[in-house]
Image (cartoon, rainbow, N blue to C red):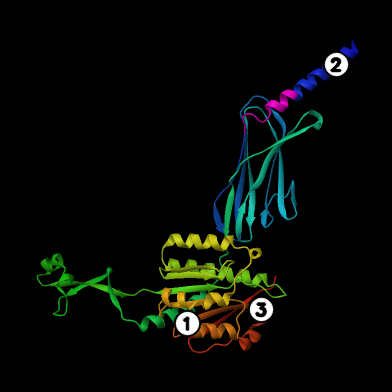
């Protein structure tokens, strides 16, 4: 009798494991997504894990695993391991017809494009005798844009240089920038007469408009870090300054272009004030990975054809580089000709005096030294 009981228990166990293996993955839906698709470095967001079991059979143990770049900082470090990537595996106990939502706080300290990859779900049979797993598809990803940094001093210099350029240009009236109404003079064209105001006042009145002109800037970013001693902090500060200047200039409706020496010859965008381009540029900078290599910055600067055909003489050229030297200064003098050039030269705190001695500045080239804390 006892033997039959044991055989019966064993048969039930085998049948249950067979049934569990066939059924556990059915009607189970696991989704992962971030609270937002983009934010600036230093911000915080949430990763959502939603597990839904739409069948009556419970899942006593359900593991949800994935990995992403290790620079993404999960506030909840439980069931997390870090090597070349950060691996996270959360364990749930899901009842039949149950839905579970878990929020995981994520600190985004470093720019980049982070995607959740190699996601899978797994379960175990009774007594953990066997483990079953399947891969799941997920498109959870987030762009972490370069951090916002203080560029007020740089913008003051830029506005002065742009103002100097504008003073040398002829002013034109903008028909969309209405200012006021005044009395008619013989020098006013007929098309400026405001007939409704003239009828009310009994004398001819004309519309007047503000004088405006197009302001343009071109940002050149050097991301090369080829020295024996790597200066990643200075490169990241250069990227942050470039990104913040792009946002500031675009928001001031200044036509702004951008070029940087990424691998394969670099990126080049002529000045524009289309806001959609700002998102493209922010994502381009977020995607940049130093491991992909760079192209020579001098080649970017010395591209005379693009300089002559793409940029006007009154375009302010802003060069951001930690590798400023006399060779680059001469290249700027040669290609920019009479155009104004502002060089932003990031150095570590305490190296300003050395940088001043090293930085050549004369003619139309002005150098702004920016000190950065060592980390």
1 or 3: tag closer to the N-terminus:
1
Report the quarter where the C terminus lies: bottom right
Of the two numbered discs 2 and 3 on the same chain, state the one appearing first in sequence.
Answer: 2
> What is the quadrant of residue 121 in the picture?
top right
Alpha carbon of mark 2 to alpha carbon of mark 3: how far?
A: 78 Å
Q: Position of residue 25 (x, y in %)?
A: 66, 31
Tell me where residue 319 appears, x and y as whole percent.
53, 77
Tag 1–tag 3 contact (CB < 8 Å): no
> Outermost residue toward the top?
1
Q: Give coordinates of residue 23: x percent, y percent.
A: 68, 26
Please rate how many residues cluster around mark 2, counting C-alpha atoms within 10 Å: few if below 14, some from 14 to 19, many from 20: few
Neighbour class for label 3 at 10 Å: few (<14), some, many (≥20)?
few
Secondary structure under the numbered disc 2 in the rendered image: helix
The image quadrant where one finds the N terminus is top right
Of the image marks 1 and 2, the number of the one nearer the N terminus: 2
Above or below, 140 relative to 190:
above
Whole-number angstrom distance, CA of label 1 to CA of label 2 = 90 Å
* Camera-side residue of 177 and 181: 177
Q: Residues within 10 Å of mark 1 (few under 14, many from 20)?
A: many
Q: Residue at x 62, y 28 (%)?
A: 97
Which element carries disc 1, helix, strand or loop? helix
Which residue was labeled with disc 2? Answer: 7
Per the image, the residue denoted by label 1 is 336
Q: Quadrant of residue 29?
A: top right
Magenta-span inclusion, residue 147: no
The magenta stretch is 18-28
Residue 349 circle label: 3
Foreground: disc 2 or disc 3? 2
Drawn side of residue 139 relative to residue 219, left or right: right
Residue situated in front as seen by the camera: 204 or 225: 225
């Amino acid at each position: 009798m006892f033997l039959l009981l044991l055989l019966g228990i064993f048969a039930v166990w085998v049948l249950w494991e067979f049934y569990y293996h066939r059924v556990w993955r059915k009607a189970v839906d696991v989704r992962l997504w971030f609270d937002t698709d983009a934010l600036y470095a230093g911000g915080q967001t949430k990763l959502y894990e939603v597990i839904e079991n739409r069948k009556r059979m419970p899942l006593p143990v359900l593991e949800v695993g994935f990995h992403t770049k290790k620079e993404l900082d999960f506030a909840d470090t439980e069931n997390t391991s870090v090597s070349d990537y950060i691996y996270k595996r959360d364990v749930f106990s899901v009842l039949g017809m149950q839905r579970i939502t878990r929020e995981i706080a994520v600190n985004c300290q470093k720019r980049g494009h982070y995607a959740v990859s190699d996601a899978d779900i797994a379960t175990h049979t009774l007594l953990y005798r066997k483990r079953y797993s399947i891969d799941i598809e997920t498109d959870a990803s987030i762009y972490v844009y370069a951090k916002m940094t203080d560029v007020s001093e740089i913008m003051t210099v830029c506005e002065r240089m742009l103002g100097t350029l504008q003073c040398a240009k002829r002013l034109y009236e903008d028909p969309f920038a209405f200012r006021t109404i005044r009395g008619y003079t013989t020098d006013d064209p007929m098309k400026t007469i405001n007939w409704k105001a003239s009828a009310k006042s009994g004398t001819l009145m004309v519309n007047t408009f503000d004088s405006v002109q197009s302001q343009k800037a071109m940002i050149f970013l050097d991301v090369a870090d080829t020295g024996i001693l790597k200066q990643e902090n200075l490169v990241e500060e250069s990227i942050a300054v470039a990104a913040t200047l792009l946002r500031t200039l675009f928001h001031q409706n200044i036509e702004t272009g951008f070029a940087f020496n990424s691998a394969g010859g670099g990126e080049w965008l002529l000045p524009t004030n289309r806001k959609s381009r700002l998102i493209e540029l922010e994502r381009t900078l977020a995607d940049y990975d130093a491991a992909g290599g760079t192209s020579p910055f001098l080649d970017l600067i010395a591209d005379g054809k693009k300089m002559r055909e793409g940029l006007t003489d009154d375009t302010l050229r802003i060069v951001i580089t930690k590798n400023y030297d006399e060779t680059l200064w001469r290249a700027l003098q040669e290609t920019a000709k009479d155009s104004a050039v502002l060089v932003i030269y990031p150095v570590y705190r305490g190296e300003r005096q050395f940088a001043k001695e090293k930085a050549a500045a004369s003619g139309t080239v002005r150098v702004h030294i920016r000190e950065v804390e060592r980390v």
